[in-house]
């Protein structure tokens, strides 16, 4: 049994996010359901937060509230490490 961790590559999310000092993140023209997974880190206006849940393409919850900062037109996602289990 071998377990290998593979880091996912950081990528820029579709759409924009305007953080408002809340754990609920609302996006504009975002695709949260297809681009993000629970446990991924997102970087919004230089703040890194972990995704706790995803309600829709335009709304998700993070584990720690953001601060009220400027609109981020190119938020990033740092995907959760992928796990490959190899049984021989």
Image (tube, grey):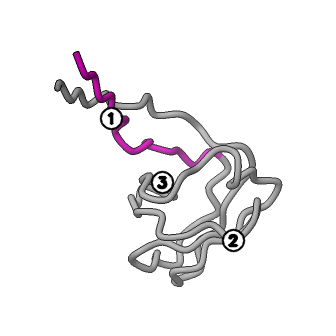
The residue that appears at 74% across and 50% down in the rendered structure is 31
Q: Which of marks 2 and 3 is nearer the N terminus?
A: 3
- Quarter of the picture containing the N terminus is top left
The residue that appears at 55% across and 74% down in the rendered structure is 61
Q: Does the magenta stretch include residue 24?
A: no
Q: In which quarter of the view is residue 55 placed?
A: bottom right
Residue 2 lies, in percent from the top left, at 17, 24
Relative height, residue 41 to residue 24 (above, below) = above
Residue 11 lies, in percent from the top left, at 54, 34
Q: Mark 1 points at which residue?
A: 83
The residue that appears at 76% across and 59% down in the rendered structure is 57
Q: Farthest right residue? A: 29
Q: How crowded is mark 3: few (under 14 residues within 10 Å), some or many (20 or more)?
A: many
Q: Is residue 82 magenta?
A: yes
Write the start and end of the magenta stretch as one range.
Answer: 74-88
Q: Nearer the viewer, mark 2 or mark 3?
A: 2
Identify the mark at residue 55; answer none if there is no mark.
Answer: 2
Q: How crowded is mark 2: few (under 14 residues within 10 Å), some or many (20 or more)?
A: few
Q: Nearer the viewer, mark 3 or mark 1?
A: 1
Q: Earlier in the sequence, mark 3 or mark 1?
A: 3
Q: In which quarter of the view is residue 6 placed?
A: top left
Q: Name the residue under label 3.
A: 42
Residue 64 lies, in percent from the top left, at 39, 77
Residue 40 located left or right of residue 2: right
Q: Given contact means CB atoms under 8 Å apart, are the residues at marks 3 and 1 in contact?
A: no
The residue that appears at 43% across and 28% down in the rendered structure is 9
Q: In which quarter of the view is residue 16 placed?
A: bottom right
Mark 3: secondary structure: strand
Depth order, front residue of 59/48: 59
């Amino acid at each position: 049994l071998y377990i290998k961790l593979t880091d996912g590559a950081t990528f820029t999310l579709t759409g924009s996010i305007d953080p408002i000092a809340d754990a609920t993140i609302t996006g504009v023209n975002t695709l949260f359901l297809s681009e993000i997974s629970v446990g991924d880190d997102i970087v919004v206006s230089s703040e890194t937060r972990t995704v706790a849940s995803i309600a829709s393409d335009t709304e998700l919850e993070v584990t720690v509230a953001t601060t009220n900062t400027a609109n981020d037109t190119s938020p990033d996602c740092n995907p959760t490490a992928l796990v490959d289990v190899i049984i021989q």
